Image (cartoon, rainbow, N blue to C red):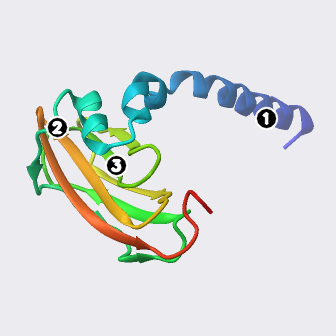
Amino acid sequence: MNRRKFIGIGAGVVATALVLPSQLSAVDFRKKDAKAFADKDIKSALKDLYGTDTTIKGGISISAPDIAENGAVVPITVSTDKANVKSIAVFIEGNPEALAAVFNVPATSIPKYALRVKMKKTGHIIVVANVDGKLYTNKKLVKVTIGGCGG
């Protein structure tokens, strides 16, 4: 391959890389639902996010360690086999801000998310799935031994 062809292909790749991010979009829920993210208790955050705090137990599964050796990094996996899931919210009991994450679930996707959360102290991880306007919930107790939000 000659040098001019190589430079031409390289310029094309760079141009594509610069244009591609403008085609993608994401919602910053911390700005969109600022009141829900600022709430200290889960019931208030749930009400601010979905307009109600009435939930149905079950329908969603949480995988998290029983004991977290470091509260600064607690891995969790959230999934559901429900159809028509609109969004999934993750709440952490005892944190300064109860709402940790919100996921918009595209219509054609499989609602399974893995993330790491920060836990200030021992408490429940509570997950709520919005399925056609009904809120399904589940929770898991995680014991934090060291670290966490407070150090």
Which disc, if any, is residue 10?
Answer: 1
Which one is in front, 26 or 37?
A: 37
Determine the CA span between mark 1 and mark 3: 45 Å
Answer with mark 2 or mark 1, whichever residue precedes in sequence: 1
Answer with mark 3 or mark 2, whichever residue precedes in sequence: 2
Residue at 38% x, 45% y: name it: 98
**Label 3: which residue?**
91
Residue at 35% x, 63% y: name it: 123
Question: Looking at the image, do the residues carrying marks 3 and 2 touch, with CB atoms under 8 Å apart?
Answer: no
At label 2, the amino acid type is Asp
Query: Which label lies toward us, 1 or 3?
Result: 3
Let me know if residue 26 appears in the view.
no
- x then y, percent, for residue 22: 58, 21
**Label 2: which residue?**
53
Q: Quadrant of the C terminus?
A: bottom right
Lateral position of residue 57 relative to residue 35, left or right = left
Rate crowding at label 3 as few (under 14), some (14 to 19) or many (20 or more) other CA atoms within 10 Å.
many
Answer with mark 1 or mark 3, whichever residue precedes in sequence: 1
Residue at 54% x, 71% y: name it: 70
Let me know if residue 92 appears in the view.
yes
Quadrant housing residue 52: top left
Rate crowding at label 2 as few (under 14), some (14 to 19) or many (20 or more) other CA atoms within 10 Å.
some
Which one is in front, 150 or 119?
A: 150
- x then y, percent, for residue 128: 23, 47
Question: Looking at the image, do the residues carrying marks 2 and 1 touch, with CB atoms under 8 Å apart?
Answer: no
- x then y, percent, for residue 16: 66, 28
Q: Is residue 37 above or below residue 150?
A: above
Q: Quadrant of the N terminus?
A: top right
At label 3, the amino acid type is Phe
Assign a secondary structure to mark 3: strand
Residue at 43% x, 30% y: name it: 29
Assign a secondary structure to mark 1: helix
